[in-house]
Amino acid sequence: MTDLLKIDRVCKSFGGVVANDAVSLSVPEGAIIGLIGPNGSGKTTLFNSIVGYHPIDSGSIRFRGEELSALRTAEIARLGLLRTFQQTRIFGKMNCVQNMQISVPHVGDSFMTMWRRFPPEVTERAESLLKFVGLYAKRQLRAEDLSFGQQKLLEFAMALMNEPKALLLDEPTAGINPTLINGLIDRLKRAHAEFGITLFVIEHNMRVIMNLAEYIYCLAHGELLANGTPEQIQNDQRVIEAYLGGH
Amino acid sequence: MNSSTRMVLSAALFIAALFVPQVPALQPYLTQIAFLWVMILFALTWDVLGGQMGYNSFGNILYFGLGMYATAVIQRDLYFTVEEYANVAGGEQAALTTAEYLFGLGLGMGTGALLAVIVAALLGSGILGLRGHYFAICTLGLGIAAGELASGWDYIGAGSGLVTPLLPDALGERGPFFYYVFLILAVIAFLVLRRLYAGQFGLAINAIRDDEDKAEALGLHTTRYKTVAWCVSAFFLALTGGAFGNLVIFIDPTDVAFAGPTFGVWMVLMAILGGKGTLWGPVIGATVFHVTQELFWTYLFGWQRVALGLLIVVVVVFFPLGIVGWMRERWPKRFGEVVDAEARKAQISLEGES
Amino acid sequence: MGNLEILVEAPIFSVQLLLDGLLVGAIFALAAYGMALLWGVMNIINIAQGDFVILGGYVTLTLYNAGIPALAGVPVAAIVLFGVGWVIYRVVIFRVVDRDLFISILATFGISILLQQLMDQIFGADIQSAESGLGTLFLFDNQVTLGKVKLVAFGTVLVVGAALAIFLKKSRMGQAIRATSQNARAARIMGINTDRVYAMTFALNAAVCGAAGALVVMTWVIQPFIGLAYTIRSFMIVVVAGLGNIAGVVAAGLGLGAAEQFAAFLLGAEFQIGFVFALLVVILLLRNAVLKRKRQVLK
Ligand SMILES: Nc1ncnc2c1ncn2[C@@H]1O[C@H](COP(=O)(O)OP(=O)(O)OP(=O)(O)O)[C@@H](O)[C@H]1O
Ligand SMILES: [Mg+2]
């Protein structure tokens, strides 16, 4: 497998806080990779760096061989590298279908396409993806009227609508009702299998990540602490200490 | 109200509007009624950014004044030298033939609109990068700076203003002529915006309003959408300004062309009063405001502007949703929003097959 | 730009401009200090800031016309404006404090228009000023003139600014104000009555503006419709200096005052106001460009 995303010695600090310290990792094409670490260990910061939300201090981030660190967020998204937000972000005053419609891939957009109406296929696809995440009955509701967990699912569906090659998910199951979590894991796996999307997932829920990911990286204090298969990580003394020991 | 009744109603309104100048009783008020269409154009064009995109601009008046001056200057320079015009302006000698007048007006308005679009595109790429209150106050500065600049520029008459050519007799009175000009402009602007809001453009600027970072994260060309939105707004405003100068004949740089404290603020107020971010809101808001304002003028002379200040405060503080926004909250179904209790209560489920 | 030669040939003119600019800039800084306080504590940008200044000027002018020395206008204008600010808070502002910033901008814009029109109705649209009767200093072989009142105004600015700073630092109310500006929720939990804090902050800001206005009418002129320029000056100064940076506010205020004098001299006095507003646009664009380069998330 080739590396879809390759991160090489990325450093990022905010004032005095070193949020990422020489982090290197790679996400092979077609894989499901996990990223774990205690609160404040720099996971979200790493995602932000990858998608160009802020510039990195040093290091390199390559997506399909192309250097990302000089590109802007929207350009990176159009390359097919998409992220969801830990603090779920949706378009609150628009209804679910509209949220989905505007999430179509924008890579071919030009001055001419910006005037177009959405063709019926787009709406159909939007509705079928809403079905996929179980939100079909709510499709005409304003997104801000959905519960937090439902918004999380909507954001996931919007990401799928965008047809990314790789999807960075920041805590997809946080705030989701435990009875729905199995269903969500199933959806993530199906998105991976059916749509061929490479997944890179931040997750605090160990049961979820062990079930989902084939390979896991663990951050602590901004540094890469351990990496390995779920079994290796589960039994890694340093990981256990990092989580239990606090900081 | 379903869409076909709404269509019939709009068509009826439009036809009624076409006949207004024929009603003898309304003749003396035609200019005031023509102003109504101008107000609607103000509110509609402001709402593109302010309501639909969430960029509250106090500076759109810039494009209005720009169109006005561009039109007047072209009308003048086509047929006169500056000195010549200064001597004859407003007098009989300045009379143009119908063909000359129409050509000058058309060319002027067209050029003004083009110029406004170019300026909006240039300014937009910088100023639309500002967010929230920085954008609002920056645009406020922009509008006033333009007025001050115009007040000092001799070529366009500086502080003593510029007179536009008179409407040739063959075209009748100014009132009815410009009534139709503004009616047509307003209808076209309305239809164009309705079409734009119905497609990707509309959703994109709504998305920018709701969460610009998220829109960017999804790969939208946010700068492009924002700039184009401002250009659309500038285009119609410049056309409006071009004709407006000819309606009022005299262009004062700060009281007519770049009239930030009056027109510039009214745009905002009317859109909010009617309902920001809705299609009909600005139309309704402008109508209500215009009528109210005329009443203020009639019954409160001297204190009408005080009352306007008060009106702004009251509307903004107590009625920020606006008329249409309020109706939408009250009767969401009439606005095509399905919010039946069933959908709200529907349990979402991810178990098994879906 | 023809005047540039004059500056080159007679550099002493620069001294005159600089002096005038710095002294008037101090008054700008005072109004800006108030705006920064309000912005920091209540997250409100007060478009009526400049109209408070002008209103303070009219209060002083009224005293002056009644035969009372204009200098007495400083405390009186401050007290009157304190009351005006308090009332405006109780009637309008408390309803918009926690809402969308644009709502408060627009609401204060409405108040600004209201005040302008009221002043126009009451005092007339003429340009007016109050003579301090303090006389003029002649410096550098009479080449530079300096109204003594400008020096007095400068001193007054220092006194008022220092008094406000000490009040914020030492008094109970001042501490409550600062606590609220750090974190209003936490302050509320700690038992601070934030509504009173807000009222006090808004009224204090108005009082500071009133004092500034008294100085404006003595050193310069007032007119009902020029308030917005003072608002924009305050805003610019705060944007350049940042919130909670008194030294920065003073420096930016003095700098703006001087820049305006030079611009007015070089471009012509008719462009002075235009210069202020154009400078605002430029400063905001520059600020954005710098922040963008760092790609910091803008609030
Ligand atoms: N914009 C910012 N400015 C300053 N400091 C920041 C910023 N973003 C993150 N940090 C700091 O960087 C560190 C890492 O934060 P980050 O959000 O990446 O953690 P995380 O691993 O995602 O934690 P969590 O599991 O709680 O989401 C923290 O100490 C945080 O305070
Ligand atoms: Mg995080």
Image (spheres, rainbow, N blue to C red):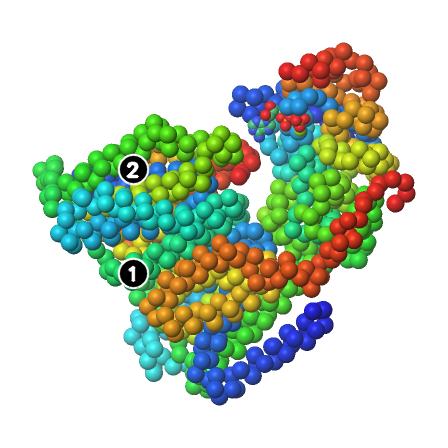
Q: In this view, does A3 lie above or below B336?
A: above
Q: Tell which residue pokes out farthest to the bottom in this image.
A: B24
Q: Position of residue B66 (x, y in %)?
A: 44, 62
Label annotation for residue C120: 1
Residue in view at x 61 percent, y 23 percent: A19
Residue A113 shows in the view: yes
User: Viewed as shown, does residue B312 lie left or right of C230?
Assistant: right
* Label total for image: 2
Q: Position of residue B59 (x, y in %)?
A: 46, 55
Q: Nearer the viewer, residue B121 or A220?
A: A220
Q: Nearer the viewer, residue B317 or B297?
A: B317
Q: Nearer the viewer, residue B99 or C124?
A: C124
Quarter-of-image position of residue C240? top left
In the rendered structure, which amino acid carries the disc numbered 2?
Leu
Mark 2 or 1, closer to the camera: 1
Q: Mark 2 points at which residue?
A: C254
Within 10 Å of disc 1 (Cα), the crowding (few <14, some 14-19, many 20+) is: some
Within 10 Å of disc 2 (Cα), the crowding (few <14, some 14-19, many 20+) is: many
In the rendered structure, which amino acid carries the disc numbered 1?
Asp
